[in-house]
Amino acid sequence: MRKRVAIILLLLATTWSLGAVDFRAVGPSQVPVNQSFQIQYIVDEKCDNIQPPSMAGFELLAGPYTSTASSFSFVNGKRTSTYQKTFTYTYMATKEGTYTIGAATIEIKGHKYRSNGLKISVIREQEQAPQMSTQRQSDERSERQGRQERAESRQRQQSPSIFMRTEVSKTHAHEQEPITLKYKLYFVGVNDVQLAGVTKMPDFDGFLKQESDLEQLESRVETYNGRQYNVATVYKNQLYPQHSGDITITPAHFEVVYTSPGSERDPFGQMFGYQEHKTLKAPAVTIHVDALPQENKPKTFSGGVGHYTMTPSISATEVNANEPITLKLDISGSGNMKLIKTPEVKWPEGFEAYDPKVSNSYQTTDSGMAGTKSIEYMAIPREPGDYTLPPVSMTYYDSESGSYKTLTTPSYSLHINRGQQRKDTEVSDYSQEEIKQLATDVRYIHTNDLSALEPGSATPAAIQVGTFGWWLCYIIPLLIAVIVLIAMRQYIQANSDINQVRYRKANKVAQKRLRNAKKLLDENQTNAFYEEVERAAMSYLSDRLTIPTADLNKETITQLLEQKNVPATLIEETKEVLSTAEFARYAPSTNQDMNALYSKTVELINQLEEQKL
Amino acid sequence: MRQIVLVISLLLSMSMAAQVEFAQANALYNEGKYGEAANQYEQLINDAKAELGLTEEYADVYYNLGNAYYKQGELAQAILAYERALRLKPRMKDAKENLRFVESKITDRIEDTHSFFLQDWLIGFRNLFKEQTWMWWSIVLFSLMLVGVLLFLLGRESVVRKIAFHCAWISLLLCLYTGINAITLHQRDLNRSEAVITQGVVNAKSSPDRSGTDIFQLHEGTKVRITDQLGNWYLVRVAQYEGWVENILLERI
């Protein structure tokens, strides 16, 4: 049993040893003169005796350092293991040129293995990447001086140093002008530097902050105060000053973890290093912010600072009513793009305007945000007609020329056509239900004969308000009325004059006649006396009651007296006097009768006078 | 004699032509060719204006024209046509009904808060009759008043005089009322002081100038009263608002 296992193991061992030994050399293809670089030989078997190739033109600075790494894993009960041993040599090139480095050899269990070869081109220091130090110019120096300095530099590099710096793109800026701020970690002579966290970050009061995506945390070599450091940018943002004056950004605190190589006296420290925690402070920085010039500041200032162009485009200038029109403004350039206020578009009255749609496509660069901001304004005209869309203006502060600049669109004339009138709905419904109104419409046209359209049948009226004829219509009746009035007045006047006189003189006349009668009575002229008495009474009544002589008789007199509300006894008396006087003329009578009639008549007239007929 | 016969026959032929045109326009309307029908009606009216003047019967033509415009969605023109129909025939029921209907479709709803209901009623009553009718009534009532005055002055019997007196003053008041109505209507038709906004949206300005401040906004179909004129600008009044509007933006009734 044991023999069998041994055989298997042996077999396995041979198979490994036979084909699977991986031995390779890893190194840079390009190195600058006087710079240390490393070549590593990696082998996946246990071994010790490596023979490096000859390195003509290179100076061995250190090495070989060996490190081993092994891992075991069980997958589905199967054990697999990997093993890696690395030999590290540090060299320094002394001369420019292209070198071919031969293979290294290694012996494992009696077998010799060869690594791959390497080709290294050594270049001048000036040609190296810009982040590398350009300070030293060894060409001008003697070899010896160079060596001395190199030795110093090595020594200096070996003294560990780690700190933070605050870097701003400018310390003097205008309001809204973008400033890039970076926190950079400088370190040298320490390994495994890690950013453990941010303890304290300034609140950037007075700025609008736009954080930038940080590229992979990679370190670059930079020279600071004549010394080379590995530098890593740990934080980057863009700041837009919001007010003028000196604005101070308070310090930031970062916590880092790194391994320091330890002191040289401590052999263990040299070997393992110490892991250290340290809080680093990035110093405060003050930015002097200038206000934007207030004079000549246009009303349309949008808050934009930088450099921009504007490209307007309109979807259509002639549409039907209720069809939308879109005005698009493309503002491109660089600056504080995000803070540009959307320019106001004054759509004509009768347009239903919608909120503008803003789409941004810009990237954060060191000069601010660069790209395009597209603003789409949509409006729907509701009424047909011709309208003018006034120009749209956007003013920004050009930080290059230091002045305000206004971008303006042209003014568009819009023609809105009348849209299609919607058709009247026709609905038919067969089920029996209450009548319901489906729609309202105008009443139907009149299709009658218009027989009266025949001319002459209805001529326009001759008499109209304001014409002479119209005035005549008022004046003629007025004249007629005035004439009638005057005529009637005169007639009445004439009539009333006679009657008035007769009325006034009635009593006088009666008294005169009565005196005459008295004389006749004294003379005993009977007939004449009666006649005189009758006439006195009759004429008195005639005058007082205004009765024409033709109508004078007892009946009329009685009637009028009744109308005038004369007492019945008096009327009776009047009648008696009248009839007595009438009849006595034709019959013989005594003196006594005549005296009685006389006094009766006098009495009657007096009484009637009292009645004030 | 021969001339008279000639004139009569000419007039008859013209009227016949008008009849035929009217029937044609109605037929076009029935076919749904509202635009053509409207043109035909307009033609008919223009001919009448040029030759004999518009008679009451042209109210029907205006009414049909209003319908044709409404069917095309030209609300302002429809309102104008109905208003003109009502000028010729104030009590034309269909025209009133359609005018009310079309006015309910326009954007502006004018509510004159300053007008008293009695005033509205008086105006409504005034518009029931034509200027001529009011005028004749006024003349008749004037004559009646004169008779009353005469009777009062010359009457013997006190009863007659009393009745005559009351008749006279009532007649005088009514004569004044009808006369004022007649004159008002006459002035309205003479000055054509009423107009309808024909443009979609119109801004009334503070001054007769395009750069004037916009005071208020009017929409198509709104009826306004013209109170003054300066060049191409009308000072219009709607409810309690007053502002200047360019003459191309409205049309007088």
Image (cartoon, coloured by chain):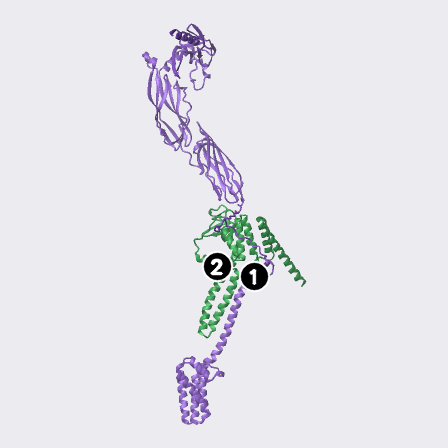
Chain colours: A purple, B green
Q: Residue at x 47, y 68 (%)?
A: B168
Q: In the rendered view, does B135 fall on the left or right side of A91?
A: right
Q: Where is residue B8, by image quadrant?
A: bottom right
Q: Find residue A461 and report its horizontal and vertical position in percent.
A: 56, 61
Residue holding disc 1: A461
What amino acid is labelled 1 in the image? Ala
Q: Which mark is residue B216?
A: none
Q: Which mark is residue B125?
A: 2
A210 vs B155: above or below: above
A15 vs B27: above or below: above
What is the crowding at mark 1: few (fewer than 14 residues within 10 Å), some, or many (at least 20)?
Answer: few
What amino acid is labelled 2 in the image? Phe
Q: Is A89 or A509 nearer to us in this picture?
A: A89
Q: Find residue A476 and report its horizontal and vertical position in percent.
A: 53, 68
Q: Where is residue A506, by image quadrant?
A: bottom left
What is the crowding at mark 2: few (fewer than 14 residues within 10 Å), some, or many (at least 20)?
Answer: few
Residue B23 visible in this rendered orientation of the protein: yes
A177 vs A517: above or below: above
- Mark in the foreground, 2 or 1: 2
Q: Find residue B219 and report its horizontal and vertical position in percent.
A: 49, 48
CA distance separating discs 2 and 1: 22 Å
Q: Residue furthest top?
A: A110
